[in-house]
Image (cartoon, coloured by chain):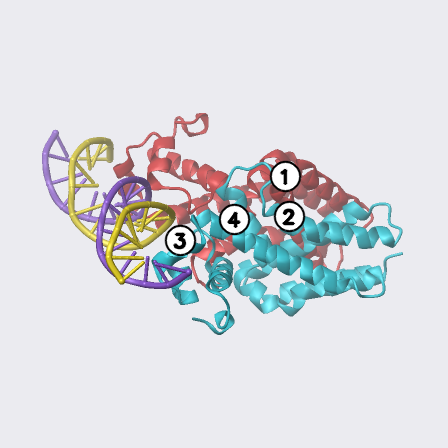
Chain colours: A cyan, B red, C yellow, D purple
DNA sequence: GTCTATATAGCGATAGAC
DNA sequence: GTCTATCGCTATATAGAC
């Protein structure tokens, strides 16, 4: 059992362990046995909490969605729309080392799940959707008519930089791109 | 056997089939049997050409690297650096439908392989590295001192937009972002 | 060189004792 | 509610006939 999984219910420990393993080594490489071991739960017992492996994946997505919404709500207390977007993108620079090692938790999960099921609009799309809509709202509040386009560009830069930082194992790629986005925001009308 | 795999040596057919399957459903979901069937080669026979599955993956990476280099060389005949970068990014808008369906072939492959092995600088990193260096050279030729930073931003926008287009199954996200990059290039000093 | 048959191992999932 | 034992399947990889 890892430090991050002590003192919770078994179900929560399983979800947290799965989320960590999915981020570190991918969904497909992760087995029920690994999740159970990390959560200090007997292997067969996992099926009491999750009928199938897919149900566990869904629970991890819901877990991430909760984190995302919590972060966005915290940011909403900031005074200006610019400060809210800055606070958002800074989440990726403060976790740049982790991003360089394992990719963006949202982006790499979406990328992998996109290939797993053939759904038109999969459940995990909401993760990036929430973030994208948040950025759009802030830019619209700034009076930008092209808020959606600018939001797409901004999130693309974040997600693309995360991919490059991960591929080249170089956290400074992530940090530098965030800095450039913030400079661009400063100069925005 | 698919149309794209007729009239080649078996080894080449296997590599091409594997590349298509990796793009469509990911590396991990793809089995030797699937690759063999698509290439019209008996399943067990694959091991005559590739001792392990990993060796097949390496061959697919080398195949993509060949395609990338071929594309970049073709672009080099264009007169101006701006035209060369434009021609490059247009590769993603002309294949926007495929990108929306399966992601960027380079990006999604890198993303997945980043999680599979723990290598510091993996073989597949060269795919994005070649593209990044190409963009940087063009921007430097334009006299930009910040050519590397601008190249990272440009490739990030491409790769991030590909992820969003794939996640939301919306090819216009990819096409629109390419258009915005081209407009940005036009306004560049 | 080509192909079939199969060894071996690890997976998700289940049955049922406690 | 909790846990063990195990089923059934599918994967990579190999051995060896042709």
Q: CA distance from mark 3 to mark 1?
A: 46 Å
CB contact under 8 Å: marks 2 and 3: no
CB contact under 8 Å: marks 1 and 4: no
Identify residue for label 1: B91
Q: CA distance from mark 1 to mark 4?
A: 23 Å
- In-front residue for pair B17/B78: B17
Q: CA distance from mark 4 to mark 2?
A: 15 Å
Identify residue for label 4: A112
Q: How many badges with numbers are in the image?
A: 4
Identify residue for label 3: A47
Q: Is residue A119 left or right of residue B52?
A: right
Q: Are marks 2 and 3 on the same chain?
A: yes
x and y percentages locating residue B52 in the rendered image? 31, 49
Q: Earlier in the sequence, mark 2 or mark 3?
A: 3
Q: Earlier in the sequence, mark 4 or mark 2?
A: 4
Q: Which chain does tag 4 point to?
A: A
Q: Which chain does tag 2 point to?
A: A
Identify residue for label 2: A126
Q: CA distance from mark 1 to mark 2?
A: 28 Å
Q: Secondary structure at mark 1?
A: helix
Q: Are marks 1 and 4 on the same chain?
A: no
Q: CA distance from mark 4 to mark 3?
A: 23 Å
Q: Are marks 4 and 2 on the same chain?
A: yes
Q: Secondary structure at mark 2?
A: helix
- In-front residue for pair B177/B8: B177
CB contact under 8 Å: marks 3 and 1: no
């Amino acid at each position: 059992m890892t430090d991050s999984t002590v003192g919770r219910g078994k179900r929560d420990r399983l979800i947290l362990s799965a989320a960590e393993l999915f981020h570190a080594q991918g969904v497909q490489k992760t087995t029920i046995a690994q999740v159970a071991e990390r959560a200090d739960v007997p292997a067969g017992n996992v099926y009491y909490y999750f009928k199938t492996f897919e149900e566990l994946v869904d629970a991890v997505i819901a877990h991430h969605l909760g984190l995302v919404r919590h972060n966005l709500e915290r940011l909403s207390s900031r005074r200006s729309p610019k400060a809210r977007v800055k606070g958002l993108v800074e989440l990726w620079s403060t976790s740049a080392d982790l991003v360089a090692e394992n990719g963006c938790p949202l982006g790499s999960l979406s990328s992998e799940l996109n290939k797993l099921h053939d759904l038109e609009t999969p459940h995990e799309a909401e993760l990036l959707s929430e973030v994208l809509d948040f950025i759009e709202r802030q830019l619209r509040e700034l009076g930008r008519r092209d808020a959606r386009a600018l939001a797409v560009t901004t999130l693309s830069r974040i997600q693309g930089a995360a991919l490059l930082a991960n591929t080249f194992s170089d956290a400074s790629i992530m940090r530098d791109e965030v800095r450039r986005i913030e400079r661009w925001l400063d100069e925005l009308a």
